[in-house]
Amino acid sequence: MTTITAETSAPARPRKLVGAGRRQWVGLLYVAPAVALVTVFFIIPLGMTAWMSLHNWPLMGEHSFIGLANYWAILRDTRFWNALRFTGWYTLVVTVAIFAVAFPLALFIERPRRLTGFYRTSFFMPAVIGFASASLLWSWLLNVDSGLFSPAAFDLGLTEKKVNLLATFQPAFWSIIAMVVWKVAGFTMIILMTGLQSIPSELQEAAMIDGAGPFARFRAITLPLMRRTLALALILSVAGSILAFDQFYIILRGGPRNQTLTAVYWIFNQSFVSFKLGYGAALSMILLAILVALSTIQLWLLRKPEGVD
Amino acid sequence: MKTMIAGLALAASIFALPAFAADTANIWVRADGSNFMPRIVDAFNKAHENQIKLDIIPNAEIIPKYGAAAAGGTAPDALSLDLIYTPAFSAAGQLEDITDWAKSLPYFASLSPAHVKTGTYKGRIYGLPFSADSSVLIWNKKLFKQAGLDPEKGPANWAEIEADAEKVNALGGDIKGFYFSGNCGGCNIFTFTPLIWASGGDILSEDGSKATLDSPQLRGAIDLYRSMVKKDLVPAGAQTDTGSNFFAAFAAGNIGITPSGAFAIGALNTQYPNVDYGVTFLPGKDGGWSSFAGGDNFVVTKGTKKLAVVKEFLDFAYSLEGQTILAKYGSLPVRGDIAKEALKDLDPRYQIAAEAMAKGRTPYTVVFNDLINSANGPWTQMVNEVFFGDDVDGAVSNAQETMQSIIDQAPQK
């Protein structure tokens, strides 16, 4: 909002102050619906969450103000920090995995060639399924008795008996990673593709004439010019992964043996299983702070280098 | 819709004599009751001036939804609530004290004792029995016959469970001897603890203030399950089943024996008429039996203005007509004195479940969700570890410690 009003007033000269003032009001009018939406659906709930986090607020019954006690309790809540550590590990692995799949796919489908439309659509398709439905689908695929993977591996003679993929940590964890990559890589691919397409082909051609190989062109031209796109894709992926919940809830229930509890899962448990809404709100505020910090760091790392336009 | 009903009610109050002014009360039920609840509400509405408006809420959402509605002042007038939550709701001061009315009912003494026990908090009654479900053992008669066992005789102690399961399992192919949901706290409190109770042990003290996991009876029951897992009598999927296959595994017809609930009788009869099954009690180590008495308590939101309508509805539910409707559509009767009559035209296997209900038990604790039902709570974690893991001692003592600390940290009011 501020940026918009600032931009409208920027070109105005001092003697046109009156007009600029009026234009500012018109500008405000234009953004008013958006401001109203943001206020009602973001600012007010956020304020309420912050307010609740200062209370002992059970799901039912009376709540009482307890100051920062919830936050002190979080410091000693080892299970939350374990969940956060797991979330961090998951975010790292899944982000790397998504980019490792999405980038080659984006390079592959960027240029128009035969069947490009078909490939784009099929790679993108899983992205339009909701996370919950995708999780349900995969929880069936991963089922040891009636699913696809274990029985297929057994029938093909790859394994001696049907392996329950969800019973121990490593196979369960990597199954989830595979599912998320399948689901999200198509979306990241589209974002990266738009970035690739915005690079003028003259640059590539000029470099080619200068004798730069494909790898050198990728490193010196494609990557730097995709900085903004990469930042967008990265932030979306990291923020989405830190807030991961559905797949762990639906497929694994936080198992095996509570080793895949994510931060949001823990907040959900505290709020709606233990009925401690105030504590859940405090945990949410902490998670929000972490997310804001991470996003800021990413934006800073991927900012435009000095002197480059 | 609400306004429309309110409008109708208003119109009715203008035109009808004031004494007959009809009133509408709103009642919620969890999805488990979606079979019988609409039937009994319909029957009530047809026969009465006052009306009930019913909302069916998904099982997992009814508690948070009710909490939010209560905070916003839009809670329903009454609620059919999973009985194990009644202590927590009463402790939160959310419910109307209905002690005097309850005790004035002539058949109060024959109401399901498990329900009344969980509906009582600090000597006052906040919940009365509404629907009931008890845990029982069911076996597949066809597979028993194929395995050379007497198809009419279910296992009556632990050794028989294991021996029968082994025989059925020997049929081979997709057929397995035994099934349980190995990663589901709710399923196992319902079907595994009765094995312990029937042998004289318990997992919580009577008042819910102590966790008592370290008992030879619990160890014995664990050994039974472990032994069956080790002998490969249980499908591999059991280890990660969070409850979604609790009923479906047996219904598919490839399982010899499984602990289940009274609900399975209605569900098998209507959805899987080809499965020929028997119902018996969940036995103790050397015989005897026990059951988890589950179901819903009927609770009234504190301060509701529709108390009269709500009482009228509950009176109707307790009548022979009401109890028969409930029984016909999947709930056991909750009035012991007329249970036989309500069940007389129904599948005789219900009689076993009704008897199990009458003597069934229910753990009493205000932190049931945290201790038992939560997929990430100590009970769920323990059952999974002790049935399939390597460190039984560690898992049991860890669960004992965690459960006790949750009990100790619970708000004392």
Image (cartoon, coloured by chain):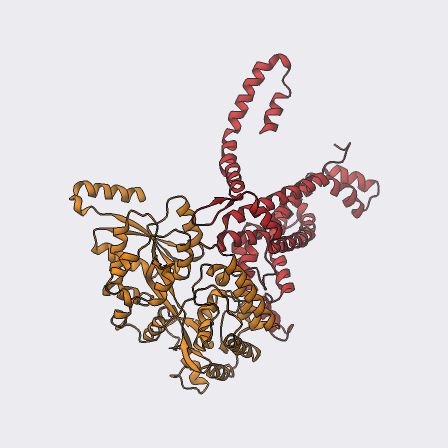
Chain colours: A red, B orange
Q: A199 or B186, which is in the foreground?
A: B186
Using the rendered image of the protein, determine whether residue B291 is visible from the camera's viewpoint.
Answer: yes
Q: Position of residue B314 (x, y in %)?
A: 27, 58
In the rendering, at what x and y percent does residue B227 appear? 55, 79
Q: Is residue A228 above or below residue A114?
A: above
Which residue is at the far bottom? B148
- The residue at the far right in this view is A211
Query: Can you see residue A119?
Result: no
Quarter the C terminus of chain A occupies: top right
How many labels, in total?
0
Instruction: Using the image, determine if residue B329 lies above or below residue B148.
Output: above
Q: Residue at x 65, y 50 (%)?
A: A114
Please state if B92 lies on the left or on the right of A112 as rendered: left
For this view, does B101 lie left or right of residue A282? left
Q: Quadrant of residue A293?
A: top right
Q: Quadrant of residue A151?
A: bottom right
Q: Nearer the viewer, residue B369 or A64?
A: A64
**Quadrant placement of the N terminus of chain A:** top right
Judging depth in this view, the residue of A77 and A271 nearest the camera is A77
Q: Is residue B206 left or right of residue A130?
A: left
Residue under the point 55% across and 20% down: A23
Residue B8 lies in quadrant: top left
Residue B75 at x, y percent in the picture: 37, 48
Please indicate whether residue A111 sits to the left or right of residue B350 in the image.
right
Residues B377 and B27: in front is: B377
Which residue occupies the extreme top position in the image? A15
User: Where in the figure is residue A236, as x and y percent of width and height?
Assistant: 62, 45
Q: Is residue B302 above or below residue A154?
A: above
Vertical relation: A64 (above or below) B178: above
